[in-house]
Image (tube, rainbow, N blue to C red):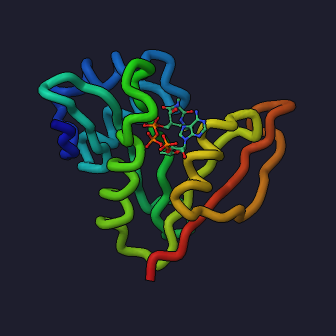
Amino acid sequence: MLTIRNALITDLRCVLSIDPTTRQGAAFVQAAVEKGECLLATENDTFVGYGVMDYGFFGRAFVHTIHVDIAHRRLGVAGRLFREFEKRCTSSRIFTSTNLSNLPMQAFLNSRGYVLSGMVQHLDEGDPEIFYSKGLR
Ligand SMILES: CC(C)(COP(=O)(O)OP(=O)(O)OC[C@H]1O[C@@H](n2cnc3c(N)ncnc32)[C@H](O)[C@@H]1OP(=O)(O)O)[C@@H](O)C(=O)NCCC(=O)NCCS
């Protein structure tokens, strides 16, 4: 059974093992866990995915990271994590971003009704960052 819950500091090593080359860095994930901003997806006690949402983006909810273990993709794990983020979101619009080259994430966001909000160049050279958002209320 798939369960979504807050990651605890005792989960940190397992969270990082899902995504060893985390783009934001281990210190960012640790701080998110400590602040209660990191959600963990487990399938029968196996860690299968995690995500981080905070309000550091113009005071709006922003999903910084979402990562599903490769063996557990296309099973609705990211969908369940985003559903929980959207439920917890206290701003009227939720934002996230991904690289232009990341077609799976773009397909995922389209499937959840996210729309294009803009693009920022020069974060990853040659691979612009695409911002998406969804109005929640
Ligand atoms: C993108 C990612 C988070 C999707 O996670 P997931 O758990 O596999 O997604 P879901 O199973 O919830 O997908 C829901 C829907 O999104 C779409 N989708 C997801 N992955 C897709 C892919 N690779 N190709 C096409 N559509 C895709 C589909 O419509 C899917 O529904 P379906 O399986 O019934 O067709 C996952 O591939 C991942 O962790 N990638 C590496 C990390 C990453 O790129 N993170 C985003 C940038 S921070």
Q: Residue at x 41, y 56 (%)?
A: 54
Q: Residue at x 62, y 49 (%)?
A: 97
Q: Quadrant of residue 74?
A: top left
Q: Foreground: 19 or 36?
A: 19
Q: Quadrant of residue 34?
A: top left
Q: Is residue 15 above or below residue 61?
A: above
Q: Residue furthest front?
A: 75
Q: Foreground: 129 or 107?
A: 107
Q: Is residue 26 above or below residue 31?
A: above
Q: How many marks?
A: 0
In percent of width and height, residue 90 lies at: 36, 74
Q: Foreground: 40 or 13?
A: 40
In percent of width and height, residue 70 lies at: 44, 20
In percent of width and height, residue 82 lies at: 40, 53
Q: Residue at x 69, y 37 (%)?
A: 103
Q: Residue furthest bottom?
A: 137
Q: Residue furthest right?
A: 126
In percent of width and height, residue 23 lies at: 55, 28
Q: Residue at x 31, y 49 (%)?
A: 37
The N terminus lies in quadrant: top left
Q: Is residue 61 above or below residue 23?
A: below
Q: Is residue 128 above or below residue 15?
A: below
In the picture, measured across the screen, residue 72 lies left or right of residue 8, that is: right
Q: Quadrant of residue 134?
A: bottom right
In the picture, measured across the screen, residue 76 lies left or right of residue 128, that is: left
The C terminus lies in quadrant: bottom left
